[in-house]
Amino acid sequence: MKKFLLLLVFCSLSLLNSCVTPTSGGSSSAPFSIGVTGTRYSTHELKGNERGNIIIKSSKPNLEGDLIYKQYASALAKYLNNNGYTVVTNDTSVKYVAFLNYGFSSSKNPVSTKPFQVGKKTINLNVEELSIATPDEKTRYRWRLGRDTTFDRAIELQMYDLSKEQPQQILTSKVVSNGHCGILSQLSGVLTDLLMENFPPKSGEAEKIINFGVNTSC
């Protein structure tokens, strides 16, 4: 019986290790995965019954016309529409604004305050400069597999209520997901799913979010 259990454990470990295959460059990719995980950090005042027009803007204004940004904004818009908001593209009659930020997370990323004009309101937004060009790699060595390179991918959402005399922040939410894929254009759906899972999120605590059955090995 003991020999059978030891054999079962050994086979299970071998199966798990086979899910990551070394590449020619020595790093590893993940052609098969049971899911993608991320840690979500949120603080908000949402009740879940909010309604009204909302406009999505990039936290990096120079990305507004970028094709990859449009992918992320489109994925976010679907979730917002499904949660009772009406996503619009003109800021003349909006009640809410959602600032979208994404890229690669690092402790070295600076945070700056940028002014944004939305309709007749001005918002001074704290923006983390998430890298969109050069990923900050994390490399570790795995038994039998050699070097294993992963990336900290991040997506962030900040929402403001513009119906107040002074714009009021009602949500800040950020997800950091460590994984093998370092191509942002292939992560828009996955990262947005993690960000908007069970929206509105829990406030004031870190949540472990799992998206089962997704392969983001690029």
Image (spheres, rainbow, N blue to C red):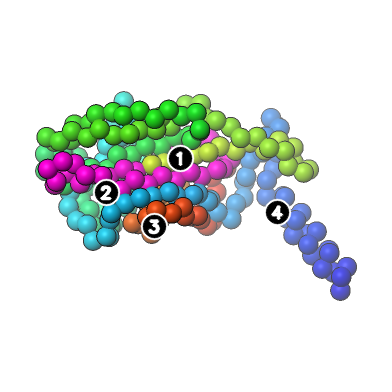
Q: Nearer the viewer, mark 4 or mark 2?
A: 2
> Is 197 situated left or right of 9 in this image?
left
Query: Contact, CB < 8 Å: mark 4 with mark 3?
Result: no
Specify the amino acid type for callout 1.
Answer: Ala
Specify the amino acid type for callout 3.
Answer: Lys
Q: Which residue is mark 1?
A: 154
Q: Nearer the viewer, mark 4 or mark 1?
A: 1
**Alpha carbons under labels 2 and 1: distance apart:** 20 Å
Circle nearer the N terminus (2, 1): 1
Crowd class of label 4 (few under 14; some 14 to 19; many from 20; radius 10 Å): few
Circle nearer the N terminus (1, 3): 1
Query: Contact, CB < 8 Å: mark 2 with mark 1?
Result: no
> Is 142 situated left or right of 205 in this image?
right
Crowd class of label 2 (few under 14; some 14 to 19; many from 20; radius 10 Å): some
Crowd class of label 3 (few under 14; some 14 to 19; many from 20; radius 10 Å): some
Q: Which mark is residue 170?
A: 2
Specify the amino acid type for callout 4.
Answer: Leu
Q: Which residue is mark 3?
A: 202
**Alpha carbons under labels 3 and 2: distance apart:** 13 Å
Q: Which residue is mark 4?
A: 16
**Element type at marker 3?**
loop
Task: Write down the region rendered in magenta.
Answer: 157-186
Circle nearer the N terminus (4, 3): 4
| Magenta segment includes 185 | yes
**Element type at marker 4?**
helix
Residue 176 in picture, x, y percent from top left:
48, 43
**Alpha carbons under labels 4 and 2: distance apart:** 42 Å
State which quarter of the image contains the C terminus. top right
